[in-house]
Image (cartoon, rainbow, N blue to C red):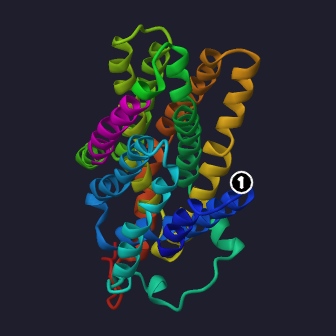
């Protein structure tokens, strides 16, 4: 956190574009260490039954932080350097705070062993978990869609006749409110439905994307100001899966490889998701239109929903298999003889 906070502040000091890129790369390096570790710590601290809610609260920071970037960053249009400087103090404070926090204990005998470097066998073992692989594919489709929407929506709103000074803050506010409540509601819904539907986290994730698919298409044909309401509902559906999908990652992987599983997931969803969606959508928009480009995005929303629904039948078994590694050791269970 300290590394990426300093790099954020450094972005406001650089005199050339090349150095700006270097600072942005340093931010990625800092966040790359944080991304796999933070949800792993949460999974160690909370049981399977409540992880959906916990992961939802944690991931609620994504829509809130992203949207605040639009809103607060827009206030510094003429003094853009300060948009970077102001990110340093909170990051430094939180980073220093981490040094005084206790790391949670793990029940797994594997997890309590001496930490070792992840091996190819670890990655192979993680990828052999059906729920994990299916979830990665669904999250990649979702990340592709969200990354492209976030990048091009302000421009799209301008093409629809909305002024930049008016549209960007409204869009940011929509993402804050809808993203926050959707993320929290999705995690709670996954936990509540778990006793009735063993694949509830996949079910919640897939259903929300399928509902969001027609809503996103409706944005393209709905006139303003009604379009704002449709946009709110579409964004709500796209963020509804955030808590459940991350809960799946935690529940189907053993503590000994959980950080590795989260790290690989983060790499995949960004490398094949929001890292390539803006160029792809931009190419389509350049040759056709943003309406057509957003039509491409809608296909990924549909694909993500269908992929997630396909994982419902595997989740219970994969969760049980991962839970075997977390049972307390030190006693032997003797089964009755038949």
Q: Give the farthest residue toward the front.
A: 78
Who is closer to the viewer here, 117 or 285?
285
Q: Relative to residue 250, is residue 332 drawn left or right?
A: left
> In this view of the protein, which residue sits in the foreground, 335 or 278?
278
- Number of residue marks: 1
The residue wearing badge 1 is 17
Q: Kindly indicate the quadrant of the structure image that contains residue 128.
A: bottom right
The answer to whether one can see residue 126 in this image is no
By secondary structure, the bulk of the magenta-drawn segment is best described as helix
Residue stretch in magenta: 168-187
Q: Residue at x 53, y 92 (%)?
A: 114
Q: In this rendering, does residue 249 appear at all?
A: yes
Q: Position of residue 293 (x, y in %)?
A: 64, 22
Q: Is residue 302 left or right of residue 200?
A: right
Of residue 205 and residue 293, the one placed in the foreground of this image is: 293
- Dot 1: within a 10 Å radius of its alpha carbon, few (fewer than 14), some, or many (20 or more) residues? few
Give the residue drawn at x 53%, y 68%.
Answer: 4
């Amino acid at each position: 956190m300290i590394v990426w906070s300093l790099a954020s502040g450094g972005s406001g000091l650089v005199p050339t574009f090349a150095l700006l890129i270097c600072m942005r790369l340093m931010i990625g390096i800092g966040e790359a260490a944080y991304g796999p570790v933070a949800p792993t710590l949460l999974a160690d601290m909370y049981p399977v039954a409540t992880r959906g809610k916990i992961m939802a609260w944690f991931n609620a920071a994504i829509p809130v932080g992203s949207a605040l970037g639009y809103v607060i960053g827009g206030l510094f249009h003429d003094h853009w350097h300060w948009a970077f400087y102001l990110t340093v103090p909170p990051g430094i404070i939180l980073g220093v705070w981490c040094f005084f926090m206790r790391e949670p204990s793990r029940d797994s005998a594997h997890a309590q062993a001496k930490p070792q470097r992840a091996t190819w066998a670890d990655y192979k073992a993680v990828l052999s978990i059906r729920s994990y692989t299916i979830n990665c594919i669904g999250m990649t489709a979702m990340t592709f869609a969200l990354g492209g929407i976030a990048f091009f929506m302000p421009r799209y709103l301008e093409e629809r006749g909305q002024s930049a000074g008016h549209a960007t803050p409204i869009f940011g506010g929509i993402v804050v409110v809808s993203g926050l409540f959707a993320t929290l509601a999705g995690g709670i819904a996954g936990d509540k439905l778990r006793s009735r539907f063993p694949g509830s986290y996949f079910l919640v994730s897939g259903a929300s994307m399928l509902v969001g698919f027609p809503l996103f298409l409706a944005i393209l044909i709905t006139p303003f100001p009604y379009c704002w309401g449709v946009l709110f509902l579409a964004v709500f559906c796209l963020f509804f899966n955030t808590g459940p999908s991350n809960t799946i990652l935690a529940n189907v992987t053993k503590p000994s490889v959980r950080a590795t599983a989260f790290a690989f997931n983060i790499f995949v969803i960004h490398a094949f998701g929001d890292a390539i969606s803006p160029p792809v959508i931009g190419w389509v928009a350049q040759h056709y239109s943003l309406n057509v480009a957003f039509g491409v995005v809608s296909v990924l929303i549909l694909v993500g929903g269908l992929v997630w629904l396909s994982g419902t039948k595997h989740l219970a078994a994969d969760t049980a298999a991962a839970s075997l590694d977390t049972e307390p050791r030190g006693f032997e269970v003797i089964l009755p003889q038949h």
